[in-house]
Image (cartoon, rainbow, N blue to C red):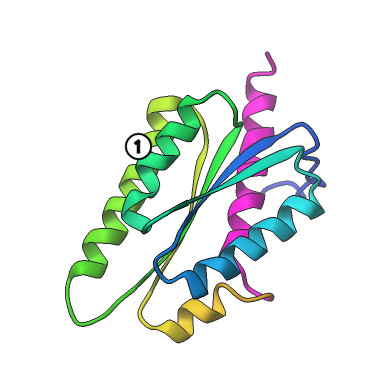
Amino acid sequence: MPPDEPTLDASDISLAIIVARFNEHITSGLLSGAQEAIERHRVASHDVFWVPGSFELPVAALHAADSDNYDAVVCLGAVIRHETDHYQHISEQAASGIQQVALDTGIPCHFGVLTCDNEEQAVARSGSDDNVGREAVESAVQTILTLRSINPD
């Protein structure tokens, strides 16, 4: 069983938040949740960047990670299943691309992309009570703090 989660102090952490415009009525809710977590944990600085859709998140994450301006990158998007296989291809490529950026650069990149069967599920996961954007920022902060404890240099 993991130890109790410490209070997250992000007062010396800088984040890049990359948000997909596609399904903006959903992703703007994810961004609101992310900004709430940024305030709550006193993130030192953050910048928000918009891309057309979730497919473009990995390349923007790579540029943010390579910039040396951020301790972590948080990627926010919403992919909703419809009648074709397009949903599966976009969600798989976004997930694997974001993970590859983290592995290649050593900069934590967090997957705050909803992959939902319908719009109702996406609305629920981007609302005030259950918000993946908030969870992604908290995960980014926790990861940075963990990496710093592993390698305190």
Residue 145 among magenta residues:
yes
Q: Residue furthest left?
A: 84
Question: Image height check: is 80 above or below 58?
Answer: below
Q: Quadrant of residue 114?
A: bottom left
- Placement of 53 over or under 122, stated as above or below: above
Q: Is residue 6 left or right of residue 66?
A: right
Can residue 119 be seen at all in this image of the molecule?
A: yes
Picture quarter containing residue 78? bottom left
**Residue placed at 57% from the left, 65% from the top?**
30
Q: Residue furthest bottom?
A: 120
Q: Residue at x 62, y 43 (%)?
A: 47
Q: Which residue sits furthest top?
A: 153
Where 121 sits versus 134, above or below?
below
Q: Which residues are magenta?
A: 129-153
Magenta region includes residue 27 = no
Task: Identify the element where label 1 is drawn.
Answer: helix
Residue matched to label 1: 100
Q: Is residue 145 left or right of residue 106?
A: right
Q: Give 16 or 5, whichever is nearer the viewer.
A: 16
- Residue drawn at the location 69% of the way across and 34% of the way down: 145
Q: Is residue 90 left or right of residue 85?
A: right
Foreground of the two, 34 or 148: 34
Return the x and y of residue 141 as percentages of the image width and height.
Answer: 67, 42
Magenta segment main secondary structure: helix
- Residue 107 at x, y = what percent? 51, 30
Residue 143 horizontal side relative to residue 20, left or right = right
Image x and y of residue 44, in percent: 77, 37
- Asked if one can make out residue 112 in the rendered structure from this viewpoint, the answer is no
Residue type at numbered disc 1: Gln
Report the quarter where the C terminus lies.
top right
> Within the image, what quadrant is residue 125 found in?
bottom right
